[in-house]
Image: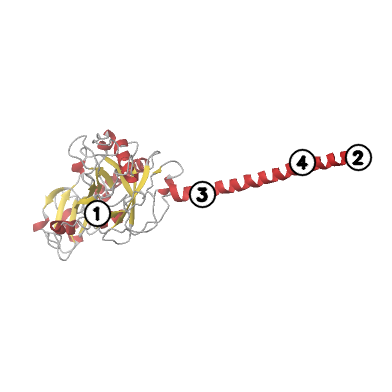
């Protein structure tokens, strides 16, 4: 009996040791599975959330549609997309594609043509009564005219608006080389050029580089938000426009836009039902809502961001607030489609387009059509951000 009890005790001890080893092995397996699941979840998150994830779907409404699906009001059974607002940090700035700084070739010659552009300047000779056969002749005329440093020539056989084919405008800029930073715009029938010295070209290149560095730093500042509008014109395929919001320079305006994109503080604060009610050719695409004042100050307007007021409306793709006077900002904004210095100091600049500017141009191309159809009460409907 004694030996049997000892054998049984030894057996029970071995069984308990086996159970502990068995439990340890299951615990190790559980930890391994949990680790793998955690890794896969992290990969999914950074792929679908931080990088804005889901592909755009077709919108169910007609005309111009801001499309996003978690905000309700869907008329079809299409797969839903969630509104996203990615916080910019050291790991997400790679999503931005900054264009290289513009640099003028010092040795390219002073009649170097810039196609599809209309250089600015003080008028020296009006083009209405000054017709040349070619752009080169227009440039030569500038070289032979006192004070002329910039020329603009109509290249469209059918004319350029009220101007005839060959209309040659002669203008003046202090440093004409700076004119070449003028953006190339779609559907512009003008060719421009400038007369400049080597010293002016070197100075202009230095200015271009400084502007590029300043804009790049503003675009990639830590704390900025990346948001998007999915746009469809007349029920065509949805196209995405992505924006960076200047959250540090224009905190109120940037936060208001971000909240309207994701339906905060509640669902009624959204671009759903908004319209592109003002589209001016090569000037602005303007949109907004009247049903609420602002998302950042619910029930009221919000003040101008001092930093945003100091920024210039100097290029295509900037986001600018619309207002009815100082410190009267609400849920209305414009995408700037050409330099507009007369807006400087009056309207807050709070972001810029970083992808999809061609789709903003598609909207802008409706300027004439929208004016013609306005009497028939056809507008551009916006459904989501």
Q: Which mark is residue 16?
A: 4
Front-lying residue, 317 or 374: 374
Q: Which mark is residue 43?
A: 3
Badge 1 or badge 2: first in the primary sequence? 2
Left of 112 or right of it: where is 34?
right
Q: Nearer the viewer, residue 12 or 89?
A: 12
Which marked residue is nearer to the observer: mark 1 or mark 4? 4
Q: CA distance from mark 3 to mark 1?
A: 36 Å
In the rendered structure, the answer to whether residue 260 lies left or right of residue 189 reads right
Check disc 1 and report its element: helix, strand or loop.
Answer: loop
**Relative to residue 376, is residue 228 drawn left or right?**
right
Of badges 2 and 3, nearer the viewer stands: 2
Residue labelled with disc 1: 381
Residue 284 in percent (x, y) is at 22, 49
Q: Earlier in the sequence, mark 4 or mark 3?
A: 4
Tell me if mark 1 has few (under 14), some (14-19) or many (20+) residues whose alpha carbon lies within 10 angstroms of its own.
many
Tag count in the figure?
4
Label 2's element? helix
C-alpha span from label 4 to label 3:
41 Å
């Amino acid at each position: 009996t004694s030996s049997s009890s000892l054998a049984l005790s030894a057996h029970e001890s071995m069984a308990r040791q086996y159970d502990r080893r068995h439990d340890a092995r299951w615990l190790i397996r559980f930890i391994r599975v949990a680790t793998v699941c955690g890794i896969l979840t992290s990969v999914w998150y950074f792929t679908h959330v931080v990088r804005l994830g889901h592909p755009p779907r077709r919108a169910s409404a007609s005309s111009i549609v801001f499309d996003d699906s978690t905000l309700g009001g869907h008329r079809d059974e299409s797969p839903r997309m969630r509104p996203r607002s990615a916080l910019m940090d050291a790991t997400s700035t790679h999503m931005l594609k900054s264009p290289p700084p513009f640099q003028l070739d010092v040795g390219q010659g002073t009649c170097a043509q810039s196609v599809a552009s209309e250089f600015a300047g003080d008028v020296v000779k009006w083009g209405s009564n000054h017709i040349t056969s070619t752009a080169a002749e227009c440039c030569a005329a500038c070289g032979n005219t006192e004070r002329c440093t910039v020329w603009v020539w109509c290249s469209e056989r059918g004319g350029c608006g009220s101007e005839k084919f060959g209309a040659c405008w002669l203008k003046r800029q202090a440093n004409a080389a700076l004119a070449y930073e003028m953006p190339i715009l779609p559907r512009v029938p003008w060719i421009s050029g400038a007369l400049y010295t080597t010293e002016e070209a070197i100075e202009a290149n230095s200015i271009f580089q400084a502007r590029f560095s300043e804009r790049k730093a503003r675009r990639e500042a830590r704390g900025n938000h990346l948001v998007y509008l999915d746009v469809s014109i007349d029920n065509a395929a949805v196209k995405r426009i992505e924006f960076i919001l200047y959250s540090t320079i224009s905190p109120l305006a940037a936060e208001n836009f971000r909240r309207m994109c994701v339906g905060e503080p509640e669902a009624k604060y959204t671009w759903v039902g908004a319209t592109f009610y003002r589209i001016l050719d090569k000037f602005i695409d303007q949109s907004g809502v009247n049903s609420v004042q602002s998302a950042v100050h619910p029930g009221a307007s919000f003040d101008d961001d001092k930093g945003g007021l100091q920024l210039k409306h100097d290029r295509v793709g900037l986001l600018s607030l619309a207002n009815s006077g100082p410190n009267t900002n609400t849920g209305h904004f414009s995408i700037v489609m050409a330099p507009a210095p007369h807006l400087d100091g009056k309207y807050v600049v709070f972001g810029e387009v970083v992808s999809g500017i061609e789709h903003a141009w598609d909207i802008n191309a409706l300027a004439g059509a929208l004016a013609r159809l306005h009497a028939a009460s056809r507008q551009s409907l916006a459904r989501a951000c």
